[in-house]
Image: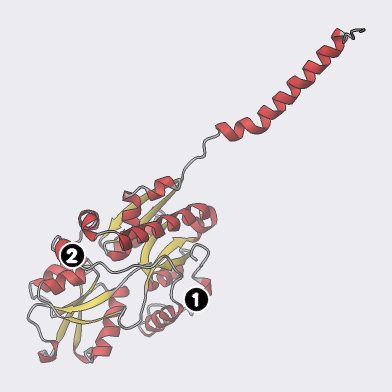
C-alpha cells in the first residue's frame, strides 16, 4: 500500500489555524470565567419601629450579602435627623411616611414611594389616666409628621379634638418616658413603643391600622431609582426574605437583636406579640389621598400631587 505524506507547509498551516481557533475560544470565554462581579451598594435609613425589622433581620442573616448587595443601614430616632441625611445626599432611601414624600418633592428633592412599610401609630394614655375626665388632653407628638397626622385622625374619631393640646416632643424615647412619668395625658407612638406604654399601665385609644390607614412607606431618591435599580430590586428581595424569617421564627430568637439595634425597650423581650408581616407591596393610594387632604388643611403644602407621580411599583409584586 502506498503511504501518503503531507507536506510540511500544510502541517504548519493546520497548526496555525488550530492555534487561532484556541485563541478565539479563550478570548470569548475566559473573561466570563475570570471577571469578578463587583457588589452593588445602597445606603438607607430606618426608624426605630417595627417597619425596620425585616431590614435589620435580613442584614443579620446575610441575605443582602448573598444577593450581592452591600447595604449600609442607619437607625434614626427622629424624622428630622433622617430628613437631613436624605437632603444632604447621605442616603439613597429611607423609611418614612406619606407626609415626607410631599415635603421632599416640595423642597425639590425628587423622590418616590417604592413600597409600604409596616407601621401602626397608636395613641396611648399615661398610666391610670382617663381621658374623658380631663378638660385638656395633652398629647405628645412629633409636629408635622405621620405622628401628628395620626393623632388628629384618632382624636377626631374618639371625640377629643376640641380638648386636645399637642405637645411637640420629636424624640420618641423621650415621649415614652414623659408619658410613663405622667407628664403627658397621652402620646402617639409607633409600635412597639406603644406596646411598651401599654405594659406600663397606659390604655389604648386607637391606632391607624384599626382605622384602615397605612401611611408608612419607603422612599427612594429618583437618582437611586435611575442609577441603582438592580440594587433596589435586591433590597426588596432581601427584605421579603427577612419578612419570611420573622413570620416563621420564634421571636425569642430575634427580639434581642431588635432591642439592641433599634433601641426597643427591653421589657418587650418577654411580653410583645410580634405581628405577622406582609411582603413588600405598593403604597396605599387611599391613605395618600387622606394624608394629602390633611396636609392642605394644615397649609403644609399647596401642591395637588397625583399618586402616580410620587410612587412606583417597579420593585414590588
The residue nearer to you, when weighing 248 against 135, is 248
Q: Position of residue 209 (x, y in %)?
A: 31, 78
**C-alpha span from label 2 to label 1:** 33 Å
Label 2 secondary element:
helix
Q: Report which quarter residue 281 is drawn in.
A: bottom left
Q: Residues within 10 Å of mark 2 (few under 14, many from 20)?
A: some
Q: Image height check: is 38 above or below 183?
A: above
Residues under numbered marks 2 and 1 in contact, where contact means CB atoms less than 8 Å apart: no
* Left or right placement of residue 276 versus residue 289 in this view: left
Image point 34% across, 52% down: which residue? 73
Image point 24% across, 86% down: which residue? 155
Q: Position of residue 85 (x, y in %)?
A: 35, 57
Q: Which residue is mark 1?
A: 307
* Left or right placement of residue 103 versus residue 8 in this view: left
The residue nearer to you, when weighing 160 against 296, is 160
* Left or right placement of residue 177 versus residue 44 in this view: left
Q: Position of residue 82 (x, y in %)?
A: 33, 60
Q: Which mark is residue 173?
A: 2
Q: Image height check: is 124 above or below 112?
A: below
Label 1 secondary element:
helix
Image point 49% across, 69% down: which residue? 311
Q: Is residue 102 visible?
A: yes
Q: Residues within 10 Å of mark 1 (few under 14, many from 20)?
A: some
Q: Which mark is residue 108?
A: none
* Picture quarter with the N terminus: top right
Amino acid at each position: 500500500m502506498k503511504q501518503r505524506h503531507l507536506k510540511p507547509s500544510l502541517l504548519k498551516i493546520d497548526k496555525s489555524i488550530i492555534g487561532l481557533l484556541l485563541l478565539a475560544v479563550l478570548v470569548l470565554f475566559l473573561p466570563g470565567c475570570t471577571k469578578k462581579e463587583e457588589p452593588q451598594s445602597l445606603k438607607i435609613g430606618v426608624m426605630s419601629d417595627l417597619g425596620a425589622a425585616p431590614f435589620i433581620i435580613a442584614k443579620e442573616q446575610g441575605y443582602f450579602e448573598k444577593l450581592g448587595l452591600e447595604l449600609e443601614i442607619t437607625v434614626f430616632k427622629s424624622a428630622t435627623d433622617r430628613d437631613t441625611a436624605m437632603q444632604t445626599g447621605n442616603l439613597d432611601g429611607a423609611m418614612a411616611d406619606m407626609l415626607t414624600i410631599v415635603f421632599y418633592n416640595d423642597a425639590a428633592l425628587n423622590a418616590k414611594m417604592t413600597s409600604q412599610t409596616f407601621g401602626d401609630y397608636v395613641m396611648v394614655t399615661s398610666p391610670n389616666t382617663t381621658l374623658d375626665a380631663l378638660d385638656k388632653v395633652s398629647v405628645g407628638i412629633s409636629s408635622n409628621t405621620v405622628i401628628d397626622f395620626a393623632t388628629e385622625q384618632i382624636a377626631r374619631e374618639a371625640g377629643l379634638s376640641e380638648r386636645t393640646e399637642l405637645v411637640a416632643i420629636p424624640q420618641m424615647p423621650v415621649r415614652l418616658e414623659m408619658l410613663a412619668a405622667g407628664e403627658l395625658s397621652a402620646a402617639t407612638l409607633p409600635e412597639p413603643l406603644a406596646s411598651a406604654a401599654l405594659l406600663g399601665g397606659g390604655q389604648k385609644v386607637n391606632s391607624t391600622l384599626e382605622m384602615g390607614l397605612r401611611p408608612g412607606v419607603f422612599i427612594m431618591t429618583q437618582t437611586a431609582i435611575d442609577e441603582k435599580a438592580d440594587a433596589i430590586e435586591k433590597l426588596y428581595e432581601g427584605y421579603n426574605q427577612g419578612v419570611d424569617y420573622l413570620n416563621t421564627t420564634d421571636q425569642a430568637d430575634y427580639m434581642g437583636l431588635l432591642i439592641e439595634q433599634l433601641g426597643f425597650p427591653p421589657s418587650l423581650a418577654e411580653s410583645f406579640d410580634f405581628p405577622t408581616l406582609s411582603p413588600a407591596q405598593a403604597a396605599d393610594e387611599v391613605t395618600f389621598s387622606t394624608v394629602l387632604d390633611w396636609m392642605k388643611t394644615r397649609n403644609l403644602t399647596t401642591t395637588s400631587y397625583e399618586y402616580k407621580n410620587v410612587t412606583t411599583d417597579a420593585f414590588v409584586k
